[in-house]
Image: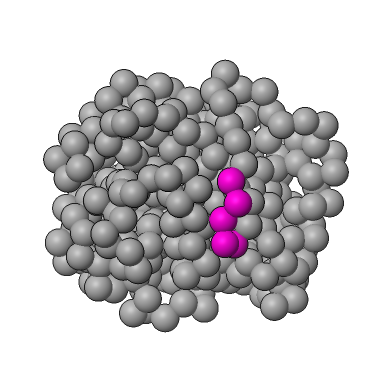
Amino acid sequence: MLSSFVDSLLARMAARRQASIPLWPRTVRYIETPVGTVRVYDSGSTKPCVVMVPDGPNVIEHYDVLIGLLSQRLRVVCFDMPGFGYSRPQHSYEHSLDQGAQAVLGVLDGLGIGRAALAFSCANGFYALRAAKLAPERISNLILSQTPSLTAMHAWTARIIPRPLRIPVVGQIVAWLFRKKTAASWYGTALPRTTDPQFFRARALAALSDGACFCLAGVVQGLVRERMASPYGVTVPCTMIWGAKDHSHRGTDPRSLHECVPQADIVHFQDCGHFPDIEQPGRFAELVVERVVRYA
């Protein structure tokens, strides 16, 4: 589609300003997947594995504290999905559930990981659900955050996402032009009023200034095109952590996830907003370790 070509072109234009790979205490690498090259952090070990994906405009660097906590007990993999962070989308990448699942499974293949837990959030949670449906033998369990049913997510999109971003090509251009403004304002909506957004905002804006992607229109349009049945039929164990103070999801019922994953266990973090994983990394890490070890 023309919209995916525009996304890819704009992402590469932004990348020209990137002088080098961002310096970070942890080693990152790039892995070729069937849908593009993605930026990946891997703690490496023979421990049970959990794979995480930042929810844009967050990038891998936002997960530094959580990675440190989880690495004590688990092998931790964290990567930017195509079109976010420093993972450039291919011309043909439309953010479909099948393509997102291919990115996930491609990372597992590239790192030689036979089986892992997936800890994904918001829209990325649907890629995790799709990967678990396509390859249940590869996914031990799911730990989702702020991922309701696809029906509820479509309603969220209509309520929260400005209409221009939902229009192919127009949305890609608008999202690119206003990517920093959108990222800066998003944390005010997504976080509790009692949480200082400066840490989250500063890291996101630094990444965007260095050429990181934030293809918000692409992922919005990709999910809108998906049929309701796409994430249904997942059989692996599933836990969803729900941040109760996420103002963007004020009208969303977290129990709607049971439409496609009846066995899902829903855990409420009453003091968290849209990012339970990095707002309360200690509590989140405890739950992740317990669930990953249980189903390893």
Q: Is residue 242 located in the magenta-colored stretch of the structure?
A: no
Query: Could you tell me residue 243's position as x and y percent?
Result: 32, 44
Q: Which residues are magenta?
A: 31-35
* Residue at x 19% of width, y 36% of height: 293
Quadrant occupied by the N terminus: bottom right
Of residues 27 and 93, the one drawn nearer to the viewer in this rendering:
27
* Residue at x 55% of width, y 51% of height: 81
Query: Above or below — where is 234 with respect to 175?
Result: below
> What type of secondary structure mainly makes up the magenta span?
strand
* Residue at x 34% of width, y 49% of height: 114
Query: Could you tell me residue 187's position as x and y percent?
Result: 53, 40
Query: Above or below — where is 246 with respect to 45?
Result: below
Residue 156 occupies quadrant: bottom left
Query: Could you tell me residue 90's position as x and y percent?
Result: 69, 62
Of residues 267 and 15, the one drawn nearer to the viewer in this rendering:
15
Query: Could you tell me residue 62's position as x and y percent?
Result: 52, 31
* Residue at x 42% of width, y 71% of height: 155
